[in-house]
Image: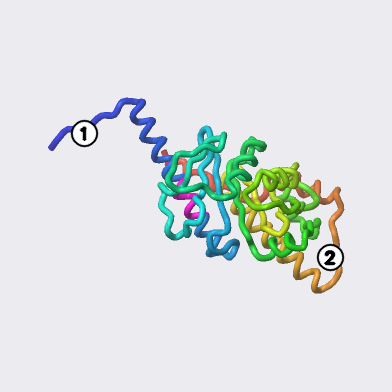
Amino acid sequence: MSAAIKLSRPERLAEVAIDEEIDERRAIIEACLKMNSSGLNQGVAGNISVRWKEGLLITPSGIPYDKLCPEDIVFMENDGGYQHELCPSSEWRMHRDILAARAEVGAVLHAHSCYATAFAICGMEIPAVHYMIALAGGSVIRCARYETYGTEELSQAVLEALQDRNCALIANHGMVALGRDLDDAMWRAVELEALCKQFAVALQIGQPLILDDAEVKKNIEKFNSYGLRRKPRNSDES
């Protein structure tokens, strides 16, 4: 039996870094599949990115999610450059610009979910009809003005709608949700769609009651200890 090959410390660190990137790429694909299976998106309309090193990892354009493999996820540099045979999502500029403007954000999810998109088609904002509005970071979820998809103008419109917010609607287009990581962005997107659905149903029943700014602020503060959490690691784990 041949002796085991011992790797130097730099080689071990490089191997760990490669494994971490592969795991992140797999997580993006899993999130895309969840996005569609949950009804949050359909086809290849949505796209996901995560902050990675001096750039971002982003879904490629037009590839069905169930056909993706880790190497299909595109690494894009912060200047928009990439070296990959597949093109990044057509909305790469919006993802890149959000991550550049918001240092606390680690992941961006864009989808064409039914209820959020329906309100976006009407150019409507989502008011504080439920305390879960706190996940947006303010008393209203704004709707960015319409601009052609994939353009710098759209990116700028979305950034304006996301000022002091963690999610937004995009007129005649869809929605975008931000998170500290991929799980957080997915949680916020799912809750945003649920909130839009509840608002749509409430409008059919009667006149929705709107929470005042003071109550919304109170709930935003309470959200510091609410929402998606990580299970604590067991003490016997390495």
Q: Which residue is mark 2?
A: 208
Q: Quadrant of residue 163?
A: top right
Image quarter in which the N terminus is found:
top left
- Where 206 falls versus 122 (above or below)? below
Q: Nearer the viewer, residue 147 or 114?
A: 147
Membership of 29 in magenta stretch: yes
Q: Nearer the viewer, residue 56 or 23?
A: 56
* Horizontal arrangement in the rendering, residue 87 relative to residue 167 (left or right): left
Q: Nearer the viewer, residue 141 or 133?
A: 141
Q: Quadrant of residue 36?
A: bottom right
| Secondary structure of the residue carrying numbered label 1 | loop
Give the residue displayed 58% in from the left and 65% down from the top. 39
Membership of 120 in magenta stretch: no
Q: Which residue is mark 1?
A: 4
| Secondary structure of the residue carrying numbered label 2 | loop
Q: Quadrant of residue 8?
A: top left
Residue 114 at least partly seen: yes
Give the residue displayed 69% in from the left and 61% down from the top. 116
User: For the residue marked with disc 2, what is the amino acid?
Assistant: Pro
Q: Report the residue that reaches farthest toward the left.
A: 1
Give the residue displayed 64% in from the left and 37% down from the top. 104
Give the residue displayed 65% in from the left and 50% down from the top. 177
The magenta region covers 25-31
Contact check, label 2 and label 1, Cβ < 8 Å: no
Q: In the image, residue 5 lies at what x, y percent? A: 23, 31
Q: In the image, residue 3 lies at what x, y percent? A: 17, 32
* Horizontal arrangement in the rendering, residue 162 relative to residue 232 (left or right): right
